[in-house]
Image (tube, coloured by chain):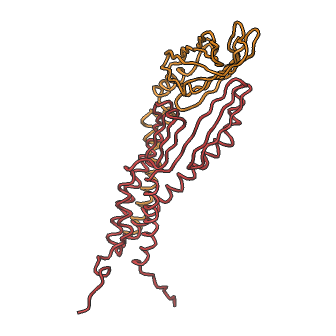
Amino acid sequence: MKKIPLWMRLPLMNWFGLVAGALMLLLPFLGPWWSATVGTGAMDLALSPFDYRVSLLEQPITSTLIGYFLLAAKLSVMIGGALMIAGSVGPKRWWGRRLVRFGAMRVFWMIIGLIALLLVGALFLNSIFPSLISGMVEGGSMQVNVPYVEGATTSSIQVGDAATVTAPITASLTEIFWVAVLVAVLGVAARIYHRRFVKPVKPVKLK
Amino acid sequence: MGERVLGWSLKLLGIALFIGPFIAAFAAHDWDLQAAVIPSQEEMDEVNERLSGLVVEEGFSEDPFTLGTPIFSNNTVRVTVEFTSPLKIPIKITDLSASISGQGGQGAQVQMEEAEVDVPANGTANFTLVGPYSGTPPTNPEPTDVNITFELYGVTLQVQMEVG
C-alpha cells in the first residue's frame, strides 16, 4: 500500500492565513510596538496602532479622538483576523478569497504607517521644531536631535550664556513590533498562497 | 450575487471603522471638536501643576546657596555648602564648581567632593567643595563664578552664576 505524505493528509486549508488570523486576534493585546523616553520620566511615549501612552512629568495625557481611532484599529484587526481564519478554513468556498483579502494586508499597512509616522515626527522635531521654538527664548538656541525610529541621542536648549538644558532621548522598537512583522509576513504569504485555491477563469470565446 | 454583497459589506465595514471613531469621539464631547482632540482640562491642569514645580518665580539666583568660610589647610581649600531647593520636585546635584578669590593670595578652583547629592522637594542638602591650593591664603575669601549642574527627571540643567 502506497504511503501518503503527511502534507497531503492535512485538510485543505490556507495554513498561513490560519496562523496569521490567530495572531491577529492576539496582537492588539500584546503591548506597544515602539517606546521612547526623554530623561527619566520627563516624557514617556509608548505607541502601537492599537494603544498609546503619553506621559509628561509622569502625568498621563490622553485624547478621546485618538483613543477611539485606536479602538477602531483594534476592532479592525480583530475582525480581519477572525474573517481570515474563516476564509482560510474554507479556502475553496466562494467567500474564502474575499475574507482572506480583507484581513491579509492590515498589519502590513499598520507597520508601514507607524514607521512613516515615526520618520515624519523625527524629521519635524529635528528640522522644523527648533526654528519655531528658538525665537521664543531671548538669546536662546535649541538643538533637537531625536532618533529616527531607534537609537539614543541628546538634545539641548541654550538659554543665553547662563543656562543649558540637556535631555537624553532613547527610542526603541519592542519585541511586539517583530511579532507584528511576523504577522504581516504571514498575512502577505496567506494572500499569495490563497491564489492556488482559486481556479483561473477560462476566457470565453465570443462567436 | 452573494460575492458582490459580501464585497460591499466588507467595504462598508472598512469605511465604518474609519468614520466611526470620529462620530463616537465628537458625540462623546457634545460635538465639541476641541474637547474631542485635545487632552482634558484636568490632565492639563495636572501637567501645569507639575511644570510650575520646576519654575522659580524670582529666577534662580545664588540665594539658595549658603557657603561656609573657606578653610585652607595642607595645600587644600574646603568650603561647606548648604543648598535649599526652591523647586517643588526632588533634584540631584551632579556637579558644582566655583572659583575662590579674595584680597591678596592666589585664587583657587574648588569642586564638589561628593559624586552627587540628592535634594528633596523644597528640602536642604549639605555638601563640600574641595580644591588644591598653594601659597598664602587670601583674606576674606569668597566664591565667584559658580557652575552648577542639576538633574531633574533625568534632564540635566547646567547653570552658570556670577556670585559677589
Image spot of residue A170 (x, y percent) = 55, 43
Chain B tint in image: orange
Residue ID at (60%, 46%): A147
Q: Residue furthest bottom?
A: A1
Q: Which lettered chain is shown in red?
A: A
* In front of the other: A168 or A82: A168
Q: Which of the image's four quarters has the N terminus of chain A? A: bottom left
Is residue A16 shown left or right of residue A144? left
Residue ID at (57%, 14%): B80
Image spot of residue B153 (x, y percent) = 52, 30
* In front of the other: A96 or B49: B49
Is residue A10 shown left or right of residue A110? left
* In front of the other: B44 or B127: B127
Q: Residue furthest left?
A: A1
Instruction: Decide: is B63 above or below B120.
Output: above
Q: Residue furthest top?
A: B140
Can residue B59 be seen in this snapshot?
no
Residue ID at (54%, 20%): B52
Image spot of residue A50 (x, y percent) = 43, 48
> How many tags in the picture?
0
Can residue A37 be seen in this snapshot?
yes
- Write down the quadrant of residue A171 in the picture: top right
